[in-house]
């Protein structure tokens, strides 16, 4: 008879790296035993008030794990439904208790233990065991495809080179993190062929968080972070219908329309467009292969995710703000603090921030994302954190929140003026047929934006909002002069740089034409559109 698959239960195995709240005894052998570098899911829930934060180095994996942990926390705490009583008051009681109820955690673990085994033969965690029969066993994905930081197939090397003929096998702790990344950030396009009934397909839809940046309130402890990140459920949400994948009695039917999302728990965990199956080696110490294919041919809507900044396209369609590794987090701050921040895209702050301050007014914001295209191209991870700023939200500090929005607008304005100015100077200097991207623009951006960020945080820290326009303008002028200095030694270069410099102030504007039969001349010199 075939041997039983190895066991790796996520409640018990130490797979989540954590950073504990500092203790005086740190470094002592007994202390290191009591505060290990990684814990299982059960210990993480029991000791969340002792953990400072989760120490996962892959931002999309942390973003995905947060969503799973929010759903589990809501279920364990009873905050998965609006009642009985007031939801905010019940959460406040938990904050005062400084920890989740150990008995409720034990009940949850006992009820779902078999669904959190990574290699269970019937219901492996967030996997589909049917893939072993529905996919061609000779056409597995391989571990290099599973680990999203590795190149596979004809893709370029990103973080490391690999040898596909002798792959470096990941441990289960590594594999489960990339399993999560696939469920939330997986690409669209061709995948392993899967046959289900009369349907045979080899194409998948993009994951629900593909190319997005999500924003999470973060407290002094993981316990505060998890409670602050809980979305408030609607009055009609019921836990017996708002189900996570591990709570469903049957595996989903790939040919059927996906079941509707009935509340925050299902919305956080049941949007995946990919199906995976990990294949451990005989010892269970490594994952040696994987199936990766489509889960459903119907696109699951991603609208309503409470951790995204939602914007509106010119056509009136909502879309989440994309991850951009070149864009610093301070440029999103007004969209996190203001109810109606400025912008042509009409951004809306993430829904979770409406109630997060009920947990603590000393909350930071952590932005986690993955700059990608819709299909196979991955560009860069995004991971950034602010100081404790959520207490400055418009609901609490309206005057300061408005000033934060004005600071952001000024910083953006002179960044755009600088970009236009150096591109125009370069085009005129090189006699290019049109204004386009150039090395000067890259150099100027690298000089301006870090200094603009420092200026923003300095003014916010000191509450010094007067004179901000002149300060950002000065930074743009300094970057422009530095980048264009080498071209001033020629007549053409000096003329191009001097003329284009007006773009720093909004560009030249011609005076209205004179009337009364005096012709159509400009009637005077060019002037700037910017106030000085």
Image (spheres, rainbow, N blue to C red):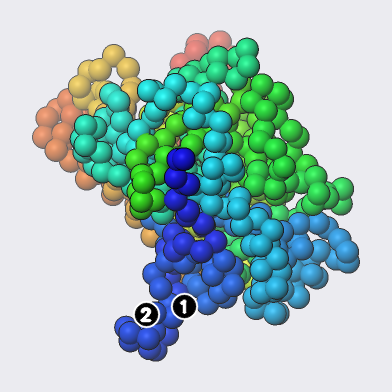
Q: Position of residue 521 (x, y in %)?
A: 46, 16
Dot 1 and dot 2 residues touching (CB under 8 Å):
no
Q: Which mark is residue 21?
A: 1
User: In the rendered view, does 140 fall on the left or right side of 9?
Assistant: left
Residue 432 against residue 419 in the figure, above or below: above
Which residue in the protein does label 2 denote? 32
Residue 226 against residue 414 in the figure, above or below: below
Number of other residues with Cα within 10 Å of mark 1, as a class: few under 14, some 14 to 19, many 20 or more? some
Number of other residues with Cα within 10 Å of mark 2, as a class: few under 14, some 14 to 19, many 20 or more? few
Q: Residue at x 65, y 78 (%)?
A: 98
| SS at circle 2 | helix
Q: Which one is nearer the viewer's eye here, 132 or 216?
A: 132
Q: Residue at x 81, y 56 (%)?
A: 81
Q: Residue at x 55, y 14 (%)?
A: 200
Residue 28 against residue 314 in the figure, above or below: below
Q: Residue at x 40, y 73 (%)?
A: 36
| SS at circle 1 | loop
Q: Which one is nearer the viewer's eye here, 175 or 87?
A: 175
Q: Position of residue 8 (x, y in %)?
A: 47, 55
Residue 215 against residue 73 in the figure, above or below: above
Q: Which one is nearer the viewer's eye here, 375 or 406?
A: 375
Q: Position of residue 260 (x, y in %)?
A: 75, 34
Q: Is residue 246 visible?
A: yes
Give the mark toward the camera: 1 or 2. 2
- Mark 1 or mark 2: which comes first in sequence? 1
User: In the rendered view, does 36 fall on the left or right side of 389?
Assistant: left
Q: Position of residue 89 (x, y in %)?
A: 80, 70
Disc 1 to disc 2, how far (Cα)? 13 Å
Q: Residue furthest front?
A: 1
Q: Which mark is residue 332?
A: none
């Amino acid at each position: 008879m075939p041997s039983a698959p190895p066991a790796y239960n996520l409640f018990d195995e130490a797979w989540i790296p954590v950073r504990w709240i500092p203790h005086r005894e740190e470094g002592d052998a007994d202390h290191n035993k009591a505060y290990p570098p990684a814990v299982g899911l059960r210990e993480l829930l029991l000791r969340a008030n002792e953990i400072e934060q989760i120490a996962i180095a892959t931002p999309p994996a942390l973003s995905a794990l947060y969503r799973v942990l929010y759903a589990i926390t809501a279920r364990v705490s009873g905050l998965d439904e609006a009642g009985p009583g007031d939801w905010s008051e019940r959460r406040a009681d938990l904050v005062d208790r400084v920890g989740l109820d150990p008995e409720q955690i034990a009940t949850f673990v006992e009820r779902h233990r078999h669904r959190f085994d990574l290699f269970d033969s019937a219901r492996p965690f967030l996997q589909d065991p049917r893939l072993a029969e529905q996919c061609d066993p000779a056409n597995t994905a391989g571990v290099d495809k599973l680990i999203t930081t590795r190149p596979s197939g004809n893709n370029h090397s990103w973080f490391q080179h690999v040898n596909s003929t002798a792959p470096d096998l990941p441990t289960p702790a590594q594999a489960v993190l990339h399993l999560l990344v696939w469920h939330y950030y997986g690409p669209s396009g061709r995948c392993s062929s899967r046959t289900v009934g009369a349907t045979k397909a080899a194409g998948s839809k993009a994951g629900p968080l593909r190319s997005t940046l999500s924003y999470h309130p973060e407290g002094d402890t993981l316990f505060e972070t998890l409670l602050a990140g809980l979305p408030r459920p609607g009055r009609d949400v019921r836990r017996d219908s708002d189900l996570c994948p591990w709570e469903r009695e049957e595996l989903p039917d790939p040919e059927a329309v996906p079941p509707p999302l009935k509340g925050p728990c299902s919305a956080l965990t049941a949007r995946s467009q990919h199906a995976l199956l990990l294949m451990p080696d005989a010892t269970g110490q490594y994952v040696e292969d994987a199936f990766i294919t489509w889960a459903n041919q119907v696109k699951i809507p991603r609208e309503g995710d409470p951790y995204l900044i939602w914007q509106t396209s010119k056509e009136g369609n909502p879309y989440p703000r994309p991850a951009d590794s070149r864009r610093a987090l301070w440029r999103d701050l007004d969209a996190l603090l203001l109810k109606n921040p400025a912008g042509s895209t009409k951004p809306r702050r993430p829904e979770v921030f409406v109630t997060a301050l009920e947990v603590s007014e000393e909350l930071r914001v952590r932005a986690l994302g993955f700059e990608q295209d819709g299909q196979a191209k991955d560009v860069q991870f995004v991971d950034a954190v602010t100081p404790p700023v959520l207490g400055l939200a418009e609901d609490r500090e309206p005057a300061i929140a408005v000033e934060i929005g004005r600071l952001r607008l000024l910083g953006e304005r002179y960044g755009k003026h600088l970009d236009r100015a150096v591109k125009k100077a370069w085009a005129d200097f090189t006699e290019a047929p049109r204004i386009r991207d150039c090395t000067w623009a890259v150099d100027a951006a690298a000089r301006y934006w870090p200094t603009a960020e420092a200026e923003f945080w300095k003014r916010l820290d000191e509450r010094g909002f007067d004179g901000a326009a002149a300060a950002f303008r000065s930074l743009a002028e300094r970057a422009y002069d530095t980048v264009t200095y080498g071209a001033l030694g020629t007549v053409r270069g000096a003329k191009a740089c001097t003329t284009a410099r007006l773009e720093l102030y909004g560009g030249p504007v011609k005076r209205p034409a004179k009337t009364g039969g005096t012709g159509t001349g400009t009637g005077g010199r060019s002037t700037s559109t910017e106030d000085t």
